[in-house]
Amino acid sequence: MAVSVTPTIGVFDSGFGGLTVLRALTQRMPQARFVFVGDTARLPYGSKSRRTVARYAAESAQFLVREQGAQFLVIACNTASALALDAIEEAVAGAVAAPVLGVIEPGAQAARAASQTGDVLVIATDATVQSHAYAAACGALGLRAMEKACPLLVPLVEEGWTEHPVTEEVVRVYLGELLAEAEARGMNADTLVLGCTHYPLLKAVIERVLESLSGPGNPDRGNSIGSAAGRSMRVIDSAESTAEAAARLFDGQGLAQKRAAPETEIRCFATDSVEKFERLGSRFLGRPVGKVELLDLGG
Amino acid sequence: MAVSVTPTIGVFDSGFGGLTVLRALTQRMPQARFVFVGDTARLPYGSKSRRTVARYAAESAQFLVREQGAQFLVIACNTASALALDAIEEAVAGAVAAPVLGVIEPGAQAARAASQTGDVLVIATDATVQSHAYAAACGALGLRAMEKACPLLVPLVEEGWTEHPVTEEVVRVYLGELLAEAEARGMNADTLVLGCTHYPLLKAVIERVLESLSGPGNPDRGNSIGSAAGRSMRVIDSAESTAEAAARLFDGQGLAQKRAAPETEIRCFATDSVEKFERLGSRFLGRPVGKVELLDLGG
């Protein structure tokens, strides 16, 4: 049953990479209102303890629910999704209209739907790989997953080099190593999960490199990946998967209807570096982020 | 006059890049004892306010002086040197045997000594460039400086790609842009300052690229840089410059004498990510960092 007022979806990330998830959400649910918080003052979350991440994420979640009236929450941050989903759920218990949604479970679900062999590759930041959250989520769905950290990809995206030859070469090195290691372990992977909210901006270059690496007779790689994964390696964009899962989960709230309004309402907060957020955020969101408001959540 | 006990030099950084400064210090003053603190739990400092950086840096400085008995302090962190040298000086007033030394002033001094034209280029992180600390320090010495942020270089060093073709290409892009812009502004630069503690690990590739960019008849660049800066562009490693300045400043304390001890004593603390510090630190220090101790400075 549709709610009477415009539903508000709160979206949280430690930085602004989660704007790729926000973008996918606005495309699926254009008639909702969105409020985004990037906890830029306290990033990176990846090097912090579970307790600290849980406290930080819960503070942002409470701000979204209590002060911004969010009825739905999407945690567009891999580290917080991996370490703090329970704590966030607890912090907003009774105040939201659906379970809090993270980015990892939807990515794993999409991988299961896409994979025919059951063997899945995941690229992510160092912190996400060390948490083994994707391997665990994939394993719980009966998939065998191999994860690889690609620490240079976030800085390359933030430098704006999404179509730069250097980026293509870096992607080629990382994916070449990943495919070779998967092959050495006897995996027959047919699906690659982009396990970082920055990576959707690299989807085109990643698909191009995968095609060249897996093509027959490729001198870099021998031929077994060519015959195993071939040109059909599916790339799972976890921002897209999360938006799909959100549309299903939040269904019955009138969120999937199209409306006439020319542009979905989005309000963005950051706890620091508002200027960088405004400058880089538009590339992630696919439209101007507008004025980003400074939010003080304390130490 | 030499002090009676082995003098202790405290070295502070927000991360572990400052180990390049520690390395240069141990080479200049091998008979001292060194204690290093990397405030890895709270990095990056670059996006934080002056007040926060001052508070964090002062806490580490007090730990080094009060709990580790440091009589001398070197701030091997560009952001803390730019924003918090006064606050650190105040926090340890009366408890150290010489002024607290940062990394920026020695880099600027070395540039003045090296430059014949008075025009200097500086490469650094985004945060250091935005502080304009090098431009100010160079300006105070009568030099004209142009700064350029090179955000990909730290991640490339941390990935261990110090001799990778990708890194050479990235350096070529950054330096090519910098030289072209300096030329467009009518500068006649003959000196390049490495304004980040990670960059000494890239000194070889930077010198190689400078030579190829400034060579006569280079198709990438026209020829005016070739005739202006030629092959004689001097590269200032601010880790080296800081160690030289420290040896002069701490002189008269018996610190410059050689001693028979086979290896200088170094003790390392980090506020988080001890594993990453141990894994990557040795590359920066040029010898094993050994066991890194976890230090809790709170919030």
Image: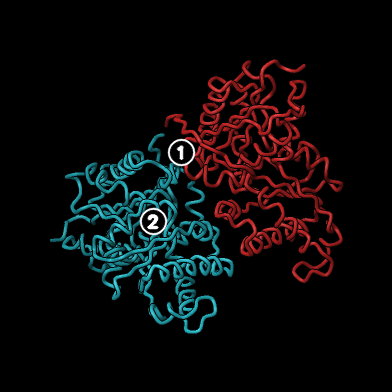
Chain colours: A cyan, B red
Asked whether B78 or A34 is in front, the reply is: B78
Separation (CA) of disc 2 from disc 1: 25 Å
Q: In the orientation shown, which residue stands out farthest toward the left?
A: A1
Between residue B10 and residue B143, name the one nearer to us.
Answer: B10
Residue drawn 69% across and 62% down?
B172
Across and down, in percent, residue B111 comes to: 78, 43
Pointer 1 chain: B
Question: In the orientation shown, which residue stands out farthest toward the bottom?
Answer: A216
Q: Quadrant of the N terminus of chain A?
A: bottom left
- Asked whether B189 or A148 is in front, the reply is A148
The relative height of residue A29 versus residue B278 in the rendered view (above or below) is below
Residue flagged by tag 2: what amino acid is it? Gly
Looking at the rendered structure, the kind of residue marked 1 is Asp
Q: Which mark is residue B272?
A: 1
- In the rendered structure, the answer to whether residue A75 lies left or right of residue A7 reads right
* Residue position marked by numbered label 2 in the rendering: A18
- Image spot of residue A195 (x, y percent): 38, 61
Q: Is residue A277 visible?
A: yes
Is B193 placed above or below A23 here? above
